[in-house]
Image (cartoon, rainbow, N blue to C red):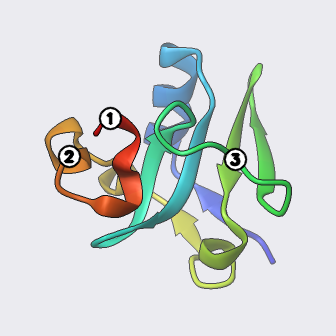
Amino acid sequence: MEIIIDDAVKEMILSEKKDFRVCTACSGPALVPITVKAPKNSDVKIPIGDNILYISAVQASYIKRVSIDMRYDSDKIFACSALNYFR
């Protein structure tokens, strides 16, 4: 299983200097900081510079690519019960 990470996603992770995770949200796969959705032991781990991109085991079985359009907007985080960290 190879998952392609778009350059824009790599650049975002490198510039923000934090770990991100692709998880399941209300509208499908979501790319969020791990402060929003913590990684799990079952996640696929992809090093990006000094950081890690975690991909949930569920999403890893469906997606072939991580693109910048998966990034979840902060205004949508409040609307999705799967991402209820900020509630």
Give the residue pinned by disc 3: 39
Eyeballing the image, is 74 above or below 56? above
Residue at the image position 38 percent from the left and 52 percent from the top:
83
Q: Amino acid at mark 2?
A: Phe
| Nearer to us in this view, 11 or 41 | 41
Left or right of 13, for residue 52: right
Circle 3: element type: loop
Q: Amino acid at mark 3?
A: Pro
Residue at the image position 77 percent from the left and 19 percent from the top:
50
Q: Which mark is residue 47?
A: none
Q: Residue furthest right?
A: 41
Eyeballing the image, is 84 above or below 11? below
Rounded to the nearest angstrom, the CA distance separating label 3 from label 2 is 20 Å
Give the residue pinned by disc 2: 78
Residue at the image position 53 percent from the left and 45 percent from the top:
37
Q: Which mark is residue 86?
A: 1
Eyeballing the image, is 15 above or below 19? above
Rounded to the nearest angstrom, the CA distance separating label 1 from label 2 is 7 Å
Rounded to the nearest angstrom, the CA distance separating label 1 from label 3 is 17 Å
Rendered location of residue 38, percent (x, y): 62, 42
Residue 62, quarter of picture = bottom right
Of label 3 and label 2, which has the lower sequence position? 3
Rendered location of residue 25, percent (x, y): 38, 66
Of label 1 and label 3, which has the lower sequence position? 3
* Mark 3 crowd level (few <14, some 14–19, many ≥20, 10 Å Cα): many
Q: Nearer the viewer, mark 1 or mark 3?
A: 1
Eyeballing the image, is 46 above or below 51? below
Circle 2: element type: loop
